[in-house]
Image: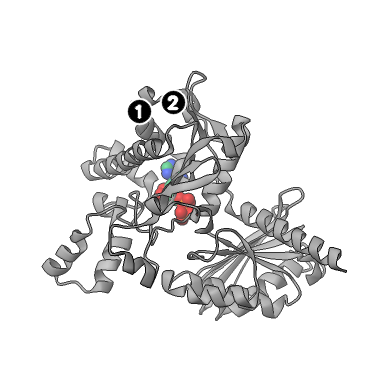
């Protein structure tokens, strides 16, 4: 099935057009700076043909029209008719407690997404705009919503409840949701494949380390705990986000520095994490470079980053009651052998033995633990677009079957 995968952000639309039968990306691209007169569309076809156009794209509706137009383009496109777009898969950030899996988008689903805006005020509105634009420009094409939160929805209450009045959970849905679900699902399933074991028979810790970072404990195919919480601010140290924090700290800083709610929110989300500690960069490559030149604060940032991942390993191995595999993914997880080495050092007593040579090899899905390691360690580049395309194809195929049974 040919599926258009859309990831609509506040001022950008990223897309991939994927043939799910052979997993080939027929074309991919993005539109950045939507809302301005200098929006940039970048489009690349499977054969390497690339174009870049700058122009006025004031809203998501027009952006989606451009995406369809470029897919249809005589010189740069890959289809001759809109009907060749058989389905659209939308990345949706927050499904709240309403979605524990991907769903066919209906009016009721759109209404429920609107009701969940309060949980993701920055992310869900552009996701909804993308859906509404597709309804207009591709009215007969089935659409599926794939949620960042859904994979974690089977977490038990002991993992998702916070130690605050229960009333606040009931009244405002304040609980742990977790994010990066499609990535954790993809890499953990792939690890099971590489291990040659059934997904529902093994215990995995999955580390998504990009600009945003999260870690998940996956027990026989179910995410039983994850480090991001009510928002993506909790858990691991990230590029510019603080991760776990004594909740009194923001209150204390607000009083001391006379900060508003918005200002303290910006401090925790944009000026903390690797950037905040190092004072140099939120980019792990830059940090490692400056750290190796002998700079103290980048080293501290690196150490805090790695130590926290290690602490979560301890917690999640205990929560899982054992471990078969660890997976690293995301820009840092896939590329930084330094981070992987620091995180995995001195864990032999848990049956985790890193192979230093394999750790240096940088390509594709790979195993980096020693043959003797009881716990296998993998590096698996994430592919969220492919997961969205496959989920979409599966749901649309089921729908087609149901309809043909009825007729
Ligand atoms: P996002 O979460 O925005 O998708 P990515 O998954 O692309 O981000 O991850 C970005 C992070 O990956 C940055 O911190 C970047 O420094 C890091 N990264 C990318 N390549 C390397 C590398 N070769 N070595 C270390 N870190 C890397």
- Helix, strand or loop at label 1? It is loop
Q: Are marks 2 and 1 in contact (CB under 8 Å)?
A: yes
- Residue 271 image offset from top left, x and y in percent: 28, 60
Q: Is residue 143 left or right of residue 36?
A: right
In the rendering, which numbered label is found on residue 196?
A: none
Q: Which residue is mark 1?
A: 345
Q: Which residue is mark 2?
A: 354
Say which residue appears at 35% left-offset and 41% top-offset. 312
Say which residue appears at 56% left-offset and 32% top-offset. 366
- Residue 193 image offset from top left, x and y in percent: 63, 35
- Residue 43 image offset from top left, x and y in percent: 65, 62
Residue 228 appears in view: no
Q: Nearer the viewer, residue 219 or 71?
A: 219
- Residue 344 image offset from top left, x and y in percent: 38, 31
Q: Residue furthest top?
A: 372
Say which residue appears at 41% left-offset and 54% top-offset. 157
């Amino acid at each position: 099935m040919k599926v258009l995968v859309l990831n609509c952000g506040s001022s950008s639309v990223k897309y991939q057009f994927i043939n799910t039968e052979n997993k080939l990306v027929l074309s991919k691209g993005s539109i950045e700076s939507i809302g301005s007169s200098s929006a940039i569309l970048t489009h690349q076809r499977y054969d390497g043909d690339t174009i870049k156009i700058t122009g006025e794209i004031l809203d998501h509706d027009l952006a989606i029209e451009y995406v369809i137009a470029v897919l249809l383009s005589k010189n740069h496109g890959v289809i001759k008719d809109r009907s060749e777009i058989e389905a659209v898969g939308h990345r949706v950030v927050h499904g709240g407690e309403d979605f524990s899996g991907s769903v066919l988008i209906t009016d009721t689903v759109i209404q429920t997404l609107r009701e969940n805006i309060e949980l993701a005020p920055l992310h869900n509105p552009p996701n909804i705009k993308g859906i509404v634009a597709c309804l207009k420009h591709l009215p007969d094409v089935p659409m599926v919503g794939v949620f960042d939160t859904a994979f974690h929805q089977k977490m038990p209450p002991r993992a998702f409840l916070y130690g605050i009045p229960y009333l606040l959970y009931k009244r405002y849905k304040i609980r742990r949701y977790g994010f990066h679900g499609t990535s954790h699902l993809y890499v953990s399933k792939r690890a099971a494949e590489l291990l040659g074991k059934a997904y529902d028979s093994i215990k995995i810790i999955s580390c998504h380390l990009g600009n945003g970072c999260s870690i998940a404990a996956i027990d026989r195919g179910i995410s039983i705990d994850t480090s991001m919480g009510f928002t993506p601010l909790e858990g691991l140290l990230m590029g510019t986000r603080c991760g776990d924090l004594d909740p009194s700290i923001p209150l204390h800083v607000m009083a001391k520095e006379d900060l508003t709610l918005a200002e303290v929110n910006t401090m925790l989300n944009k000026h903390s994490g690797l950037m905040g500690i190092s004072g140099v960069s939120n980019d792990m490559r830059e940090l490692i470079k400056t750290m190796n030149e002998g700079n103290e604060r980048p080293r501290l940032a690196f150490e805090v980053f790695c130590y926290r991942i290690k602490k979560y390993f301890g917690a999640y191995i205990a929560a899982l009651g054992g471990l078969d595999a660890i997976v690293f993914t995301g820009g840092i997880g896939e590329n930084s052998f330094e981070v992987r080495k620091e995180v995995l050092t001195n864990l032999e007593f848990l049956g985790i033995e890193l192979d230093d040579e394999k750790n240096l090899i940088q390509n594709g899905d790979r195993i980096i633990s020693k043959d003797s390691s009881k716990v296998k360690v993998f590096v698996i580049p994430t592919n969220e677009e492919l997961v969205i395309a496959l989920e979409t194809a599966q749901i649309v195929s089921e729908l087609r079957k149901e309809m043909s049974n009825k007729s």
